[in-house]
Image (cartoon, helix red, strand yellow):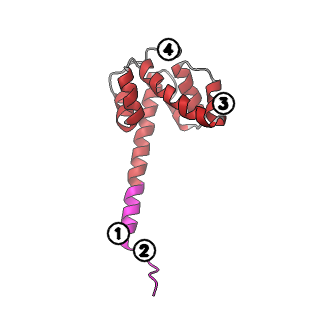
Amino acid sequence: MSNNYVDAGSIVGFVFLGLFSLAVLVFYIISMWKIFVKAGKPGWAILIPFYNTLVELQILGRPWWFLLLIIFVPIADFVIGIIMIFDTARVFGKSTGFGFGLLFLSFIFIPILAFGDAKYIGPIAGQ
């Protein structure tokens, strides 16, 4: 005899997980929106795929063709992503240690960057 039913606990669990994931996503979008605004860019840019990366590259002072590398070169996206994380810390006047925080604990350090006292000091990539 087969059990062709889903118990209520599973449904509640999936609904809770979905709502929690949605809340985390909304909080991340709000945090990134705030970071873009601090850097003098439009916050809504975070909502548009690829354009948000292009705007972030502008914030960091990196060339636009990094976006092409991110899209088309398999290992380059990983390396450039790490470079962008550390550049993000630097353009907001934070240390390399904060960059490691962004890399490994981004769910904590992105809101700190967004809602804390960090000030955008301008694109400093390549310095």
- How far is the residue under mark 4 from the one under mark 2? 55 Å
Label 3 environment density (alpha carbons within 10 Å; few <14, some 14–19, many ≥20): few
Q: Which mark is residue 124?
A: 4
Q: Is residue 58 left or right of residue 72?
A: left
Image position, residue 91 (x, y; %): 45, 18
Question: Residue pushed farthest top?
Answer: 127
Tag 3: amino acid: Leu
Q: Which mark is residue 9?
A: 1
SS under mark 4: loop
Upstream in the sequence, badge 4 or badge 2? 2
| Nearer-the-camera pick, 15 or 65 | 65
- How far is the residue under mark 3 from the one under mark 1? 46 Å
Image position, residue 112 (x, y; %): 34, 30
Tag 2: amino acid: Val
Residue 24 in sight from this viewpoint = yes
**Callout in the foreground (4, 2):** 4
SS under mark 1: helix
Residue 42 on the magenta span: no
Tag 4: amino acid: Ile
Which residue in the structure is indicated by mark 2? Answer: 6
Image marks 3 and 4: residues in contact by CB distance under 8 Å:
no
> Is the N terminus in the top left, top right, bottom left or bottom right quadrant?
bottom left
Tag 1: amino acid: Gly
Which residue in the structure is indicated by mark 3? Answer: 68
